[in-house]
Image (cartoon, rainbow, N blue to C red):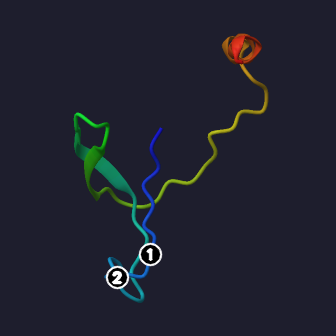
């Protein structure tokens, strides 16, 4: 999974008072060295939630048993 994140002190991509917005992936390409170039566009309001589940699935329990 990839979670885009903007960091640093360079040129501001979002000015003061900018409204948060969701983005959707519209194009991606991987270079021969494994660098991923991704293009996103705004996609409405931010959807919040969690990727965690209360109880792991049987498949997840098996995966954890086999993980070294």
Q: Position of residue 67 (x, y in %)?
A: 70, 17
For image coordinates 78% across by 33% down, the residue present is 54
Label 2 sits on residue: 12
Quadrant of the drawing holding the C terminus = top right
Instruction: Using the rendered view, name the quadrant where residue 13 is placed.
Output: bottom left
Which type of secondary structure does the marked residue at label 2 adopt? Answer: loop
Residue 61, by quadrant, is top right
The residue that appears at 30% across and 43% down in the rendered structure is 36
Mark 1, Cα crowd under 10 Å, few <14 / some 14-19 / many 20+, is: few
Q: Are marks 2 and 1 in contact (CB under 8 Å)?
A: no
60 on left or right of 37 = right
In the rendered view, tell whether residue 68 sits above or below residue 6. Answer: above
Q: Residue at x 43, y 71 (%)?
A: 20
Question: Which residue is under mark 1?
Answer: 8
Q: Position of residue 48 (x, y in %)?
A: 56, 54
- Give whichever of 15, 43 is nearer the camera: 15
Asked if residue 45 lies left or right of residue 39, the reply is right
Q: Nearer the viewer, residue 21 or 29?
A: 29
**Mark 1 secondary-structure assignment:** loop
Residue at image point 79% right, 26% down: 55
């Amino acid at each position: 999974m990839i979670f885009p994140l903007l960091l640093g002190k360079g040129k501001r991509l979002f000015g003061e008072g900018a409204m948060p917005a969701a983005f959707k992936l519209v194009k991606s390409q991987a270079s021969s060295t494994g660098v991923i170039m991704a293009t996103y566009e705004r996609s409405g309001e931010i959807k919040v939630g969690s990727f965690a589940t209360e109880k792991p699935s049987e498949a997840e329990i098996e995966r954890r048993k086999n993980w070294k």
